[in-house]
Image (spheres, rainbow, N blue to C red):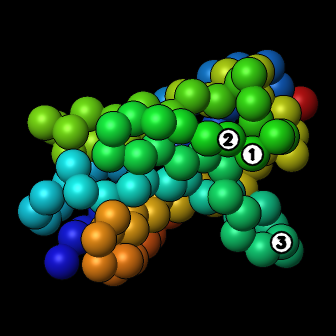
Amino acid sequence: QVELVESGGGLVQVGGSLRLSCVAYGSNFASYIMDWYHQAPGNQRELVAVISPGSSTNYADSVKGRFTISRDNLGNTVYLQMNSLKPEDAGDYYCHARHLMTGSEYWGEGTQVTVSS
C-alpha cells in the first residue's frame, strides 16, 4: 500500500514557474514507476510526465522543454518542475504510482495550479 501526497500547487503568472512535489508513504518506492497527470477543468486526466525507477523519463509533447520530472528514491519523493507556464497548464495535477512488477496503482488527491495572464 502506498499513500501519495502532493504539494506545491498555487497561483502563478504566465511564464512563471512552480515545482510540484509528491511524497510516497509506504514501502519500496524505488519499485514504482511514477507519473504526473494533468486535468484541466472539463477535460479528461492526461499524462504529463513519467519517470522509471532508474530515472528514465518521458513527456507529453505539450510540456517537452518546459517541464522536468525527477525523483529522489531515498526521500520517497517525485518532483515536477514546471517552467514557462501557459494558461492551458492550469488545472489539477495528480501524482500516480504503478508498481513495476505487480502493476498495483495508486493516486494522490491532487494539487491545483492556476495560471494568470
Q: Residue at x 29, y 78 (%)?
A: 102
Query: Where is mark 3, residue-wise?
Result: 43
Q: Are dots 1 and 2 in contact, CB under 8 Å?
A: yes
Task: Tell me how far mark 1 sits from mark 2, CA to CA.
Answer: 4 Å
Q: Amino acid at mark 1?
A: Ala
Figure check: 16 above or below 116: above
Image side of residue 106 versus residue 82, left or right: left
Viewer-nearest of labels 1 and 3?
1
Figure check: 88 above or below 5: above
Figure check: 117 above or below 58: above
Quarter of the image where the C terminus is located: top right
Q: Position of residue 89 (x, y in %)?
A: 78, 44
Query: Where is mark 1, residue-wise?
Result: 60
Task: Tell me how far mark 1 sits from mark 3, CA to CA.
Answer: 16 Å
Query: Where is mark 2, residue-wise?
Result: 59
Q: Residue at x 21, y 39 (%)?
A: 73
